[in-house]
């Protein structure tokens, strides 16, 4: 509360900037959705960007398996890559297998001894 007879306080530049920011944010939230911010992170991606089958890999001793399901409208060409743990064991890549829309495929391969890592690559 101001003492009686004292002049009113002047706003500084910071206070003016804060007031302008608050006014613009209130305006932004009162506009219709067509004028608001762009799509949110929860919005679905456009259909042309949907790509890449979901794959689950499994190893059993020296053998590796991948089961992939393509839920998208485009064809996914996949290949299983196996990196063997031993330096002298030959790493391998499976042949390319195409999975059409709503199709599941199985990929497999092996090393002579232990498996170091397994992954699946995807191409359009």
Image (spheres, grey):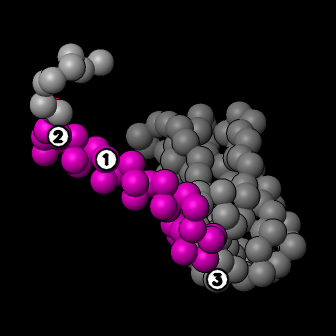
Bounds of the magenta segment: 9-38
> Magenta segment, principal secondary structure?
helix
Of marks 1 and 3, which one's residue comes earlier in the chain?
Answer: 1
Verify CB contact (< 8 Å) between mark 2 and mark 3.
Answer: no
Q: Nearer the viewer, residue 38 or 1?
A: 1
Q: Residue 89, position in %: x, y?
A: 49, 45
Q: Residue 47, position in %: x, y?
A: 69, 80
Label 2 – label 3 distance at C-alpha: 52 Å
- The reply to whether residue 124 is in sight is yes
Q: Around disc 2, counting alpha carbons within 10 Å, would you say few (fewer than 14), some (14 to 19), or many (20 or more)?
A: few
Residue at (59, 47) in percent of width and height: 118
Q: Nearer the viewer, residue 73 or 82?
A: 73
Q: Residue 72, position in %: x, y?
A: 77, 74
- Image disc number at residue 11: 2
Question: Which secondary structure lies at badge 3?
Answer: helix
Label 2 – label 1 distance at C-alpha: 10 Å
From the viewer's perspective, is residue 42 above or below residue 89?
below
From the viewer's perspective, is residue 18 above or below residue 53?
above
Residue at (78, 69) in percent of width and height: 70
Specify whether 31 is left or right of 88. right
Specify whether 25 is left or right of 96. left
Image quarter where the N terminus lies is top left
Question: Which secondary structure lies at badge 2?
Answer: loop
- Reading the image, the residue beneath label 3 is 48
Image quarter where the C terminus lies is bottom right
- Reading the image, the residue beneath label 1 is 19
Verify CB contact (< 8 Å) between mark 2 and mark 1.
Answer: yes
Label 1 – label 3 distance at C-alpha: 43 Å
Verify CB contact (< 8 Å) between mark 1 and mark 3.
Answer: no
Q: Around disc 1, counting alpha carbons within 10 Å, would you say few (fewer than 14), some (14 to 19), or many (20 or more)?
A: few
Q: Nearer the viewer, mark 2 or mark 1?
A: 2
- Image disc number at residue 119: none
């Amino acid at each position: 509360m101001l003492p009686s007879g004292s002049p009113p306080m002047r706003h500084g530049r910071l206070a003016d900037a804060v007031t302008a920011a608050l006014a613009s944010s209130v305006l932004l939230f009162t506009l219709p959705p067509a004028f608001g911010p762009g799509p949110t992170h929860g919005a679905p991606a456009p259909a042309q960007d949907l790509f890449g089958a979901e794959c689950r890999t499994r190893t059993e001793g020296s053998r590796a398996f991948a089961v992939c399901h393509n839920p998208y409208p485009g064809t996914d060409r996949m290949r299983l890559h196996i990196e063997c743990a031993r330096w002298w064991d030959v790493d391998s890549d499976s042949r390319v297998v195409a999975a059409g829309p709503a199709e599941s495929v199985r990929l497999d391969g092996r090393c002579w001894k232990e498996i170091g890592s397994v992954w699946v690559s995807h191409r359009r």
